[in-house]
Image: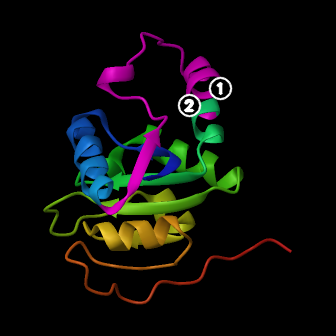
Amino acid sequence: MSDKRNVFISHIHEDDHGLKKLKDLLGPKGLELRDSSIHVGKFNKATDEAYIKTKILAPAINWAGTFICYVSPHTKESDWVNWEIEYAAKQGKRIIGVWEHGEKECDIPQALKEHADALVGWNGDSIISAIDGKDIWEKPDGGPCDSVPLKRHPC
């Protein structure tokens, strides 16, 4: 029997293929991701930015228990990804960065630098540990990251 988790996977549309790879990586380890993110299979034709944020993305992020950012070389350039991360942080979501399979290390979105609870390589056990609440900081190859400053919490 698999453990089912509701997640929102923030990504750029060029990385849609990576969502299936991520689910395929975790499935054999007993974790089924139920993903509310927008991708080719769930594409919509909305064009109004405010509508997309309030009526499509916000409810999808609110539904998810965990927020995952799929990190690839162009993710950092996406205003949408940064907005999604900022919104998830305001909702108190656990925010995890997962390096794209085969990534050698690239810049991550600014909002992820500010709000991530974990950043893990392409390793099913590390990803599951991060989803389960362990604060892990890894390079794409699974090695430890340089020290990361602690997040500041408002008083």
Question: Three-letter amino acid code at disc 1?
Answer: Thr
Any magenta on residue 60? Answer: no
Give the x, y percent position of residue 17.
20, 38
Which residue is at the front of the view, 79 or 25?
25
Instruction: Say whether residue 146 is left or right of residue 81.
Output: left
Q: Which residue is mark 2?
A: 57
Residue stretch rendered in magenta on the structure: 29-58
Q: Residue furthest top?
A: 45
Q: CA distance from mark 2 to mark 1?
A: 6 Å
Neighbor class of circle 1 (other Cα within 10 Å; few <14, some 14-19, many 20+) is few
Q: Residue at x 49, y 64 (%)?
A: 131
Which residue is at the front of the view, 130 or 55?
130
Q: Residue at x 54, y 70 (%)?
A: 117
Which residue is at the front of the view, 35 or 9?
35
Question: Three-letter amino acid code at disc 2?
Answer: Leu
- Looking at the rendered structure, the secondary structure element under dot 2 is helix
- The reply to whether residue 120 is visible in this rendering is no
Q: Which residue is mark 1?
A: 54
Q: Quadrant of the C terminus?
A: bottom right
User: Quarter-wise, where is residue 11 in the image?
Assistant: top left
Give the x, y percent position of residue 54.
65, 26
Q: Residue at x 38, y 42 (%)?
A: 78
Instruction: Say whether residue 21 is left or right of residue 132.
Output: left
- Looking at the rendered structure, the secondary structure element under dot 1 is helix
Q: Residue furthest front?
A: 1
Any magenta on residue 50? Answer: yes
Relative to residue 89, is residue 46 depicted above or below? above
